[in-house]
Amino acid sequence: MRFNTERDYSTITMLFNKELINTVIDNNVILYKLHQQLSKTNSYGETTKKIWYTGEVIPALVNRQVTNPTSDLMTYNVDQQMEVAFLREECRDRNVYPENGDIIEYGNALYEVHNVNENQFYAGVANYNHTILCSTHLTNKNNLQLER
């Protein structure tokens, strides 16, 4: 904190990060927020029918892992993990924050968010939290009822 000011943090997040992600990298994902009131759950929080809001296009950094194919008797499944990093400022501007259970569409595939990490601090200072990092896994398109 001693050598990093609010002005330094603002310059890095607004000029460098936002410009880099929105203009240079230009990589968008679609974030579908889970509609928790319409997704009826039992007393354990489980549900057979989930409903999502209309997707929001948002710029992000994406790191997809290699696919891991598995076969069980007569079925063939593919597992893939993906990390998606959103700028906190971009999420605030769009009034959209990723949470567990949300769906991210990227590269004609759908991934469910299973972990959200908001501990990406600039210079180790908690007030300078600039990134929301989501861990996701590939999900089956047939089980989802998304509004596109």
Image (cartoon, rainbow, N blue to C red):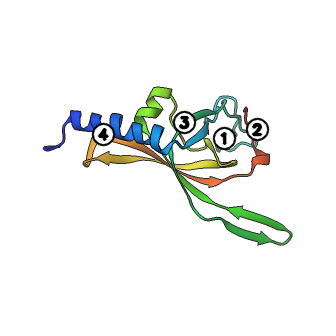
Please name the residue that numbered disc 3 is placed on: 58
Q: Nearer the viewer, residue 100 or 20?
A: 20
Viewer-side label of 1, 3: 3
Mark 1–mark 3 CB contact (< 8 Å): no
Q: Disc 2 versus disc 1: distance between alpha carbons?
A: 23 Å
Q: Identify the element where label 2 is drawn.
A: loop
Categorize mark 3 by other alpha carbons within 10 Å: few (<14), some (14-19), many (20+): some
User: Which mark sits nearer the N-terminus, 2 or 1?
Assistant: 1
Q: Disc 3 versus disc 2: distance between alpha carbons?
A: 20 Å
Q: Disc 4 versus disc 3: distance between alpha carbons?
A: 19 Å
Please name the residue that numbered disc 4 is placed on: 12
Please name the residue that numbered disc 2 is placed on: 145
Mark carried by residue 43:
1
Mark 4–mark 1 CB contact (< 8 Å): no
x 26%, y 49%: residue: 124
Viewer-side label of 4, 1: 4
Q: Is residue 120 left or right of residue 81?
A: left
| Quadrant (top left, top right, bottom left, bottom right) of the N terminus | top left
Residue 73 percent coordinates (x, y): 84, 72
* Residue farthest to the left, as pictured: 2
Q: Identify the element where label 3 is drawn.
A: strand
Q: Identify the element where label 4 is drawn.
A: helix
